[in-house]
Image (cartoon, rainbow, N blue to C red):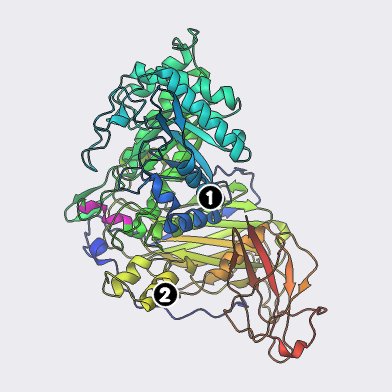
Amino acid sequence: MVSVAGQARKPRAWPAAVALLALVCPAHAQSPASVSVEIDANAAGVPLERVWPFYGYDEINYTTSPEGKALLAELARAHTAPVRVRNHFLLNTGDGAPSLKWGSTNVYREDAAGAPVYDWLLTDGIMDAITGAGAYPFVELGFMPEALSSHPAPYLNSSTTMFDSGCSYPPADYAKWASLIRAWATHAHERYPNVEASWLWELWNEPDLAYWKGTVDDYGKLYDYTEAALHDVLPGAALGGPAVSGVANGFLKQFLEHCVHGTNALTGQTGTRLDLVTFHAKGGVELVDDHVRMNLGGQLRLHRLGFKIVAGFPELTSTPIYITEADPDGCAACPVSSVPSNQYRNSTAYGAYELAMMKRSIELGAKEGIELAGLLTWAFTFPGTPYFAGYRSLSSNGIHLPVLGAFQLLGSLAGTRLPLTSTGARTLDDVVEHGVRDQPELDGMATLNEGAVQVLLWNYHDELVASPPTSVHVSIRLPASFGAYARASHLRVDEQHGDAYTAWQGQGMPESPSSAQLAELREAMVPSRLRPDETVAVASDGTVSFDFELPRFGVSLLTLLPASEPEDAPAPPSAAGGCACAVAGGGGQRSSALGSLGLLLAAFARRRRPRVVAQPAARRGQKLRLLEPQLGEPVVARDPQDPAAIDQAAPEADGRRLWQVRGRAGHLGDAETEESGLDQHLVVEHEVVGVFR
């Protein structure tokens, strides 16, 4: 094995997340001595079901905050599939001031004669932020404007934990409600491109709870009027519901019965068009014996019940299902100070839970014969709150939490999902019925996409207790197109990689981090390389293998690309195990993730003739700005005096466009320069591997 990558920085001596994992509970801290994972990239696979690029949050006015806009852009960059964003309070009356568990846009009021007056200023700002980031709205039509409510006063909730507002009541006039939906859809269609095909639409939120003060029949009537109004303007728009909080209380089944066999309140005919079915499911988190216990099995059982209810209507077997809130617990806006069990949210356990839940839900959907289209994570950001306060969020004051790093690794997957076997995986039925309460589950997903093989692994357990890492042996049979060598990268999220919360603890948990501390946190939050990228030899039987340790709740992403033979390459190994590429576990090396992310994104790049650029006095790590880069375009540059002085360059943003470059040290090749005075420029080969718009 020959390494031709840049150097990795020394590991930091960050302490464990003491508030979460300091208590060792022998009954629950068991780990298998080792786990073997096998992937055959030549096997027949299935199209990858990317059910994960869905996010949402209560506080719709956080969308236009600087922190909100930055996070939206980060989410759009993180995924190979379109990102959808859902919010509450889209139609509420108010001045648009951000507030916890509240929001408003003031879209509707009436003049003295009772005629509607529409105002799209605030909604435009919100939708501009979402679409401007490269995401798409998952439009939640709700709640009731004050002038339309059948019980408008008091209009504001009495507290953040009570939903007793006038916005939760049915309309006083269903025809005026329909006119509002028609007007909003018309405005959106005129302002934004391809709304009919690219946006998703849903009526209300959790009408089985206090968010709706009407009956199931009242909700059905509201849906009938909404469906007719929306499809008057956008005939091809996908609309659904009922977004219930629970699937066992009968509301979901009654609503589906109404849409399939009931009487339409507007037309008097049988049935109402239903383009998608939505419901919610929360796992449940609790404190047990002084540690946090999660409940993956509990959430999956809710998913299964919802799937079975939908499958009970043969007319809906091909109707896509979106679980528009799929989370470990219920209250996103409840911090650790009010709910101590929410301490899991800052830890790496949150991300590992999400990945395990996503895969198992895909398997459940296939088993039940339904079409699972999306699992929406109800988490965003809470601007102005203390650092790492324990809200269910993806970032804290602009610092990404480990769960976002896990989603970045998951979001990079694309192409064909390959069969993956792991001796550390449990059966689906076992996880659904019992959760992960004794031995942990070390499982994963693998993909083949345009010549790249990716393997995503996680080490999950319901109990947040300290535990030794698990030794992992990964064997991958590569396609013949790889030839004798492969380029391998290994990105990691664990307490030493991509975990700003643990870094913050190591700083002494400052309430107001200094500039230097913030810089350290920003570096720590990025999923990072477990070791430098490397070129590995492929065995005669087409396999490569890797050995490393995966900590409890750790997430690893291996990416392999075909590679040419490096200088001083060893002879290819025999078929007995391929290349055993040992990777140190535990205190693994932290380094910039740029090289590995570039290698990952290069799987989707098209090869082109190199373009030569140069930059005066460039040095390692300096930003290299490329004007109008093309996807997959190689950019060659060199310095005759010091050709290996740069091996990578940082990403550069320009408005809504961001590109990344990947450098290869010591590989110069032949190039013609378009710049004079080459001896004054330090340059090296770089390749543009991603252009995001």
Q: Residue at x 40, y 22 (%)?
A: 114
Q: Would you identify the image quadrant in which residue 634 lies? A: bottom right
Residue 519 - label: 2
Query: Which residue is identified by label 1?
Result: 420
> Mark 2 packing: few (<14 Cα in 10 Å), some, or many (20+)?
few
In the foreground, 163 or 113: 113
Q: Is residue 440 magenta?
A: no
Where does the N terminus fall, quadrant-wise? bottom right
Residue 146 as seen in the image, left or right of residue 50? left
Q: Nearer the viewer, residue 690 or 288?
A: 690
Please tell me which of labels 2 and 1 falls first in the chain: 1
Per the rendered image, the range of residues in magenta is: 340-345
Query: Which residue occupies the extreme top position in the image?
Result: 268
Secondary element at image label 2? helix
The percent coordinates of residue 5 (x first, y second) are: 60, 77
Hey, what amino acid is under mark 1? Answer: Leu
